[in-house]
Amino acid sequence: MNRLLETLRVALSALWAHRLRSALTLLGIVIGIATIITVVSAVTGLNVYVEEQVFSLSPDVFIVSKFGIIQGRDQFLAALRRKDLRLAEAERIATLCDSCHDVGATVQGTKSLRAGNRRLADVQINGSTANLAALFNLDVVAGRFYTEAEVRHAAPVAVIGWDVQDELFPGLDPLGRTISVDGAPLRVIGLLRRQGAVFGQSQDKITWLPLTTYEKMSGRHRSVDIWVKAASLAVFPIAQDEVRSILRRMRGTSFREEDPFGMVTAEALQGLWRGISSAAFAMMVLIASISLVVGGIVVMNIMLVSVTERTHEIGIRVSIGARRRDIMMQFLAEATVLAAIGGVIGTGLGLGVASLVARFSPFPTVTRPALVLTALALATSVGLIFGLWPSWRASRLDPIDALRSE
């Protein structure tokens, strides 16, 4: 232990003696470690955020849509040629699917809302069946959601988000008041819980109304999305197969042909996001790795210069009894300590950048202790690996030639 402490003390003294050179040597490692900390924190935070806020689809619910999950131009063009899904198909599925607990439908558009002299543009308008409040986990904090009877009779009612209330009815109770969409009046019967923003995009600039009311105002020009809740997780695959079979039969699809619709599940959405985030993560790690390799090469070159400058010192130490192993450990300790210091600085810088990103942008970051430990270990390993060659060269110097050196 005493020998190890003495080795570290001498290593720190040697680094301190060349402070400027040591600081410049650290740059590559600092940048590499800071990049890794920042990127991994951002990707981890985004993964958690996306799973909780964006892809909040229940694991026992799936969506049947005209497009499904599109992952390429050819898939998009093929989906464009499909027939639109209709409310009647959702109702047929609800009647025939034994493994389905609930079936609903939605259609979506963007329109302007008016209330008196006030106007709010680019509001997301969702038409739906009455059971979408449960399927979509909507929380009505005032008033109520519309009923099946109101959907059946295309009642002119609406449930609004907080942004709609704040812009059209500032300081007023919106319940019972009237808003208009494309000139059609709607009575506000409910107010949704405040959702906040996702990636800086407000989730409260929204209005829900009966699907039949939406189609009455705007026509049947949009394909509906059919929401299906399985009777249980155990029968989830069976429910998917049943719905697929029912729709294919209704559309007369041959067994040789692909499904004329797409299916979206929570697992598929999260898998798609993981693929995207993994690609971005791999790219940034590659860039950080290049920086670390460059930093390691700089450490190796500086240590080789140090060996050359201290050749006479090495000769003296060997002549008074230092073993080759001691010389090698001395220079290896210097390289490792140098890289470790760079790792500590880079970690601190990365944590600071991650904190600033979380504070001043809509993108969350999550930094776990394991990430910090891994970054420090990685930086130390760079010094250890790239310090091997200079340390070996120092240990193999001939003591007589070394003593002659000045």
Image (cartoon, rainbow, N blue to C red):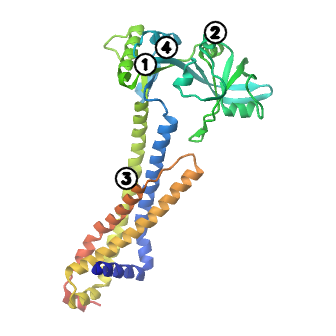
Instruction: Answer few, some or many: residues within 10 Å of disc 2's Cα (few below 14, many 20 plus, some between 14 and 19).
Output: few
**Which SS class for mark 1?**
loop
- Comes first in the chain, label 4 or label 2: 4
Above/below status of 312 relative to 240: below
- Comes first in the chain, label 3 or label 1: 1
Instruction: Answer few, some or many: residues within 10 Å of disc 3's Cα (few below 14, many 20 plus, some between 14 and 19).
Output: some
- Comes first in the chain, label 1 or label 2: 2
x 45%, y 63%: residue = 346
- Comes first in the chain, label 3 or label 2: 2
x 40%, y 32%: residue = 267
Label 4: which residue?
90
- Which of discs 3 and 4 lies nearer the camera? The answer is 4
**Which SS class for mark 3?**
helix
Q: Amino acid at mark 4?
A: Ala
Q: Amino acid at mark 3?
A: Leu
**Which SS class for mark 4?**
helix
Label 2: which residue?
153
- Which of discs 4 and 1 lies nearer the camera? The answer is 4
Query: Residue 286 bears which disc, if any?
Result: 3
Instruction: Answer few, some or many: residues within 10 Å of disc 1's Cα (few below 14, many 20 plus, some between 14 and 19).
Output: some
- Which of discs 3 and 2 lies nearer the camera? The answer is 2
3 and 1 marks in contact (CB < 8 Å): no
Query: Residue 252 bears which disc, if any?
Result: none
**Residue 253 percent across, percent down from the top left:** 37, 10
**Residue 34 percent across, percent down from the top left:** 45, 60
Among the 4 quarters of the image, the one containing residue 400: bottom left
Q: Rounded to the nearest whole Å, what is the CA distance between mark 4 and mark 2? A: 17 Å
Query: Residue 261 bears which disc, if any?
Result: 1
